[in-house]
Amino acid sequence: MEQELLLWVRGTGLQIAAAVFVFGMVYRMLHLLMLGRKMSLAAPRGSEWSGGLRTMWKRSFVSTKLSARGNFTVIAGFIFHIGFFITLFFLSQHIELFRAVLSLHWPAMPRGVIDISAVLAIGAMVALLVHRFVDPVKRLLSDYQDYLTWALSFLPLLTGFMLLREIGFEYITLLTLHIASVELLLVVAPFTKLAHMFSTFISRWYNGAVNGFKGINI
């Protein structure tokens, strides 16, 4: 039974999840881009492009204008995203998957670097969840999507680390759980806040372009 389930998630399940992810994300991004905005009849007071690029740059790093709690969220978020990026793209097993599917490959990072990145990313996610619970403003503003997207992002990291270290369950069970958690993430991402993986820089550029057109330097 376990072998059959593993074969399904590695084959048909992965194909379905990838198709939903690609088509869902394309739809979301096209919908976002086609919304557009009304043409301004005012004379431009600045450059849209410079304003958009400046906002993308500034909002991608910690701002000195943020409070200590705000900086904590940004720094922990950076740790999670960087750790997730390293484990996703520089683990040798993942690179072999990219080679098989996309015919693309690159050097892998040492296992120790992957382990540290995964642990830091997991720790950052736990810290962010605790912070969301204890901060009254964040707790008030949080809805089910915030906790759902947290869980969907956390499970692939946790099951992947457990798989590498063979913690808790047999190898086949862990591999099945890991792949299934990734597929669940792929299926749900286009229809939740996880779509920000593609929309973040588009929205930042848009906001900066509007302000740049008006001559506002943010």
Image: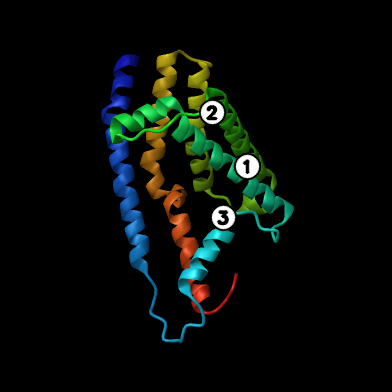
Q: Residue at x 58, y 33 (%)?
A: 122
Q: CA distance from mark 1 to mark 3?
A: 18 Å
Q: Secondary structure at mark 2?
A: helix
Residues marked 2 and 1 touching at CB (< 8 Å): no
Sequence-earlier tag: 3 or 2: 3
Question: In the rendering, at what x and y percent does residue 103 appear?
Answer: 29, 34
Viewer can see residue 50: yes
Tag 3: amino acid: Ser
- Taking 174 as reference, is 127 left or right? right
Q: Residue at x 54, y 28 (%)?
A: 114
- Taking 119 as reference, is 48 left or right? left
Where is mark 3, residue-wise?
60
Question: In the rendering, at what x and y percent does residue 52 appear?
Answer: 49, 67
Toward the viewer: 53 or 183? Answer: 53
Q: Identify whether 200 is placed above or below 116.
A: below
Where is mark 2, residue-wise?
114
Q: Secondary structure at mark 3?
A: loop
